[in-house]
Structures are given as C-alpha cells and as structure tokens.
Amino acid sequence: MSETKHDAPVLAMRELLGVIDALIAPGGCPWDKEQTPLTLCDYLAEEAFELIEGIRSGDAHEAMEELGDVMFILLFMATLYEQKGSHTLADSLNYSAAKMIRRHPHVFGDKHFDNITELWDNWEKTKREENKGTNRKRVFDSLPSGLPPMLKAYRINSKAARNGFTWESDRDVEAHLKEEWNEWQEAMASGHAEDSEKEFGDYLFTLVELGRRKGIKANAALDFANQKFLARFAKMEELAEMRGLVLNDLGLDEMNGLWDEVKDWERS
C-alpha cells in the first residue's frame, strides 16, 4: 500500500503518545505523573500564545516548534482523560470530524449556498440543533468566558451579526462610533473615573465591530501594533547606545528625533 500524506503525522503522533506514556509510567517523571487536565490548562494557554507569536512573527521554524508543543499538551490531556476512563483521543477526534461534516453540508453533502451569509446562517442553525438538550441553548452560551477581552468583543459582535443583530451599514457603525466618542469625552469632562472607563469600553467595543466589518480582527491588529512599537523602541535604544546616550536621560523631543530616524530607516 502506498504512503499517504497522513502517514508521517500519524506515526509522529504515535511516537509522541509513547513519550507521554513513558513520562507518566511508574518509573517516569514525578512532575508529569502529578498532572491533570486541569493543571495543564495554563500550560496550554501559554503554549498557544507562543504558537500565535511564532505565526505572527513570520518565523516558520518557531511556528513548527510551538505547534509541536501545543500538540504535546493536547495529547497529554487526552491521555489523562483516557486513563480516568472518561473518553479517548479517538472519541475526541471522531466527534470533531462528525461535527465538521455536519457543519459543512456544501462540502460533504449536496447543499448549496449562494454566498457567505447563507453559509453562516446554516452554521448557526446547525449549532442550535446540536445544542438542543444541552446547557448551551442561547446564542452566547458557547462563548468561552476566559477569552481575552479584545478577542471576546470580536466574537460577540461576530456572533451577534450572524444572528441578524447588527447595524445595517458601515456608515451606521461609524455614526455610532462618533456618538460613543462624544459620550466618552463628556464622561471625562465630568471627572467621573468609573463613567469614563465604561464609556471608553463602549467606544472600544464599537471600534472592534467596525474593524470586523472591514475584515480586520482587532486582537491581531493590536498585537501587530504592539510588536511594531516594541521593535521600534528597541531600535531607538540601540541608536542611543551607539551614540553614547542614555535613553532615560533624553528629553521628549530628543527621543522623538530618534523615533523618527527609526521610522525613516524602516521606510528605506
């Protein structure tokens, strides 16, 4: 039988599962043997963020390495659940495969959608059918409570839009954004800190929705902005050191001058 593109990953997964079995065996690692799916949650979050960082940085080798680390934690969790008699890795994979097949009738069936809106409408309808008889009966019941706020705002707006609850046009969102800006300004003018914070939150929430409608994911966009600032600041520090200057001793105008040099260097 000829090899398929899935043979190598399956063999590698078996090898990694063997490593995990050895780590939690009687003669294995004391730390690993103490772990539970719950104690591994923070490590999963950390590894996921490191994977995201590798992907967004454009470093393919880093992404490769971190993807493996994420898989290690996931397989570790699956092994621990299987040991407890809860469910197996195969159960999880089969459940996911069946779910994806159900939610893609245009790929695995004879369903046809004329546009993305119809596709998403069917996706939400399918999810509602799946959630019947569970505690996930309402639109946002499946939204993870632990999502970072910026990402959660995007998901809230996205799910609301898929269920028909959104502004009719981008212009309407832009008008509402101006309203939220004015309300924030008024709250700040009043000197009430709590109101200022709430109104600023409303402004950000609406801004996230405007970005979503333009095809921009606020969380990713802000992360790119963060990385750009950090890279420029590091370069600014290098320039200061090369000239025998201490950045903290410089005035704002001098630092702005270095900042502009870095930007000019980027453009060139």
Image (cartoon, grey):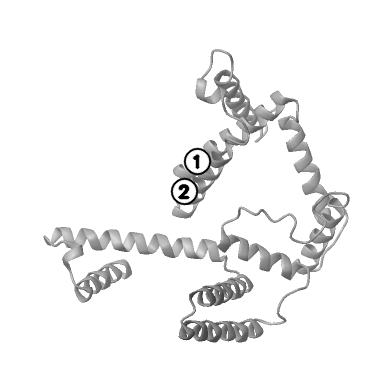
Q: Earlier in the sequence, mark 1 or mark 2?
A: 2
Residue at the spot x=16%, y=58% of the render? Answer: 241
Quadrant position of the N terminus in the picture: top right
Using the rendered image of the protein, determine whether residue 150 is visible from the camera's viewpoint.
yes
Q: In this rendering, would 90 be left or right of 217?
A: right
Left or right of residue 91, residue 73 in this image: left
Badge 1: how crowded within 10 Å, few (<14), some, or many (20+)? many
Q: Dot 1 corresponds to which residue?
A: 66
Categorize mark 2 by other alpha carbons within 10 Å: few (<14), some (14-19), many (20+): some
Residue 65: image x %, image y %? 48, 38
7 shown above or below 252: above
Residue located 51% across and 20% down the image = 30
SS under mark 2: helix
Q: Quadrant of residue 74?
A: top right
Judged left or right of residue 182, residue 254 is left
Q: Nearer the viewer, residue 225 or 181?
A: 181
Q: Position of residue 208 (x, y in %)?
A: 58, 71
Question: In the rendered image, which quarter contains the C terminus?
Answer: bottom left
Residue 53, x across and y down, in percent? 47, 51
Q: Which numbered disc covers residue 54?
A: 2
* Callout 1 amino acid: Glu
| Residues at circles 1 and 2 in contact by the CB criterion of under 8 Å | yes
At label 2, the amino acid type is Gly
| Residue under the point 50% across and 65% down | 221
Residue at left offset 65%, top offset 54% = 145
How far apart in space, not on screen, are marks 1 and 2 (Cα)?
7 Å
Q: Quadrant of residue 247?
A: bottom left
Q: Position of residue 155 (x, y in %)?
A: 65, 62
